Image: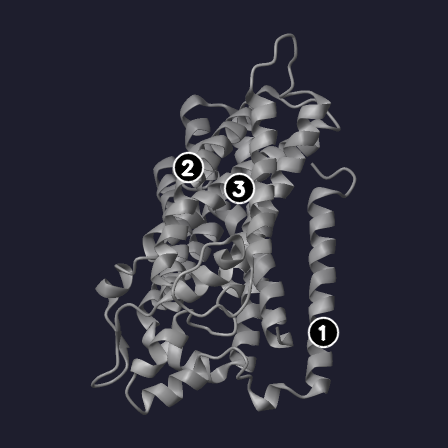
């Protein structure tokens, strides 16, 4: 795998983990705030406010890494960006507009806390939650297109039939699997944050309730993933190259070429899912004479489960992305010969991940990129240390 693809994968991995946490937080925070306002529970409102501070950090981290990913993509693959940006402008547009409204909602929700009327603050909260789901809606439509270009129109000029694109056989299972996985990880993350606090001091009753509810929701999400994951895997029969790159090493292959083997990464992901299942059952299964959930061992197990969930998200995204290497569109080898000229030549070149811009391949530029990424990762590590580990930070 070439260096540009590795750079893209590195920053994208951090971006997607932060985004997944954000989906869960954007879902639960307005709900907690509304319930606190109705019941007059100041402790619950303070818990929601604390989670919002964490959300601001994760959103900022996601934004920085998303920007780095965009810069790398434009720098290394300008030909692909030029073509894909035009063809998939509408699904990209859905995400971009949603990002703008989401940022507005974050700022307004925070500065409107205690200043807006409850009804206005709730409306901003709804906007925060809805846009948290429409952002990945647009991007997953693009990812489904990169599986197989459903809705692609070449004549009279390259364009995209949005209805056909949304009917892409891989879109719905990919989107539902993604948001459900995000909620599973996100609620385990919330439980993990509370468990980290519980290791050092007694949790309040509100925190204990939130901790327990988060674990229960994570378990429901994991159960749902037992169905959504296989659904997406079955949908990949429409993307036989990607299917083979993932499952051929496990003895399941379709009538299509196999360019690489990522069965090992699939196995790693399944092990991480199993770890989550064991942790959640350990925490919630009734064991006579013990109270595991709020014990030191229970808190430690929760943190392990949260880390495993984050790594599951990471490995799942890498599996989905790398299993179509060296092509941007996984089905490109099967459809290239069916395209008329000049599209055959243009798209075959633009959709190849090994077709890196000559101007971006200078060794000194790679060195500068490595230095920049190192600084970015160091800043990220320090940010996470300050937020989650620094003494007296609650």
The residue tagged 3 is 186
Vertical relation: 192 (above or below) 152: above
User: Disc 3 or disc 2, which is closer to the eye?
Assistant: 2
Report how far apart the C-alphas of labels 2 and 1 lie in the structure: 39 Å
Mark 3 to mark 2 CA distance (whole Å): 15 Å
- Secondary structure under the numbered disc 1 in the rendered image: helix
Q: Is residue 204 above or below residue 84?
A: above
CA gap between label 1 and label 3 equals 30 Å
**Residue 26 showing in the rendered view:** no
Find residue 225 and report its horizontal and vertical position in percent.
Answer: 44, 40
Q: Does dot 3 land on a helix, a strand or a loop? A: helix
Tell me: 220 left or right of 42. left
Per the image, the residue denoted by label 1 is: 370
Q: Relative to 254, is 2 on the left or the right?
A: right
Q: Which is nearer the eye, 138 or 264?
A: 264
Residues 363 and 267: in front is 267
Q: Nearer the viewer, residue 234 or 142?
A: 234
Residue 112 locus on image (x, y percent): 46, 45
Which residue position is annotated with label 2? 224
- Judge the density around disc 1: few (<14), some (14-19), many (≥20) Cα neighbours within 10 Å: some
Q: In terms of sequence position, does the residue under pointer 1 or pointer 3 come before the other?
A: 3
Residue 147: name its quadrant: bottom left
At x 48%, y 36%, the residue is 222
Q: Check disc 2 and report its element: helix, strand or loop.
A: helix
The residue depicted at 34 percent of the width and 72 percent of the height is 88
Quarter of the image holding residue 202? top right
Give the residue furthest to the top.
289
Residue 68: x and y in percent read 58, 69
Residue 72 visible in the snapshot: yes
Question: Disc 3 or 2, which lies upstream in sequence?
Answer: 3
* Structural crowding at the residue carrying mark 2, measured as other residues with C-alpha within 10 Å and reported as few (<14), some (14–19) or many (≥20): some
């Amino acid at each position: 795998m070439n260096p540009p693809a590795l750079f893209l994968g590195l920053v994208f991995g951090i971006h997607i983990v932060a985004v997944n946490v954000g989906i869960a937080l954007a879902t639960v925070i307005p709900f907690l705030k509304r319930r606190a306002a109705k019941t007059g529970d100041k402790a619950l409102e303070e818990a929601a406010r604390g989670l919002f501070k964490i959300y601001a950090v994760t959103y900022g981290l996601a934004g920085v890494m998303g920007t780095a990913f965009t810069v790398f993509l434009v720098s290394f693959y300008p030909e692909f960006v030029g073509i894909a940006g035009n063809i998939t402008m509408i699904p990209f547009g859905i995400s971009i507009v949603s990002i703008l409204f989401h940022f507005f909602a974050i700022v307004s929700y925070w500065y409107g806390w205690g200043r807006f009327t409850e009804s206005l603050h709730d409306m901003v909260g709804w906007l925060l939650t809805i846009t948290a789901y429409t952002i990945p809606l647009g991007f997953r439509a693009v990812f489904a297109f990169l599986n197989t270009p459903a809705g692609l129109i070449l004549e009279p000029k390259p364009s995209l039939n949005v209805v056909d694109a949304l009917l892409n056989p891989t879109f719905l299972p990919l989107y539902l699997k993604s948001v459900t996985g995000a909620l599973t990880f996100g609620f385990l993350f919330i439980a993990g944050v509370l468990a980290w606090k519980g290791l050092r001091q007694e949790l309040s009753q509100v925190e204990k309730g939130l901790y327990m509810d988060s674990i229960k929701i994570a378990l429901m999400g994991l159960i749902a993933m037992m169905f959504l994951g296989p659904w997406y895997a079955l949908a990949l029969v429409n993307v036989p190259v990607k299917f083979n790159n993932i499952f051929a090493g496990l003895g399941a292959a379709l009538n299509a070429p196999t360019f690489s083997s990522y069965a090992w990464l699939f196995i790693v992901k399944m092990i991480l899912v199993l770890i989550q299942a064991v942790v959640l059952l350990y925490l919630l299964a009734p064991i006579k004479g013990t109270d595991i959930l709020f014990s030191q061992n229970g808190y430690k197990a929760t943190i392990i489960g949260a880390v495993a969930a984050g790594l599951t998200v990471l490995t799942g995204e890498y599996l989905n992305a790398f299993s179509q290497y060296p092509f941007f569109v996984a089905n490109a080898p099967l459809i290239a010969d069916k395209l008329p000229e000049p599209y055959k030549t243009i798209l075959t070149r633009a959709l190849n991940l090994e077709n890196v811009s000559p101007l971006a391949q200078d060794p000194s530029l790679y060195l500068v990129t490595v230095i920049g990424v190192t600084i970015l990762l160091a800043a990220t590590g320090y940010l996470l240390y300050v937020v989650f580990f620094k003494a007296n930070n609650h």
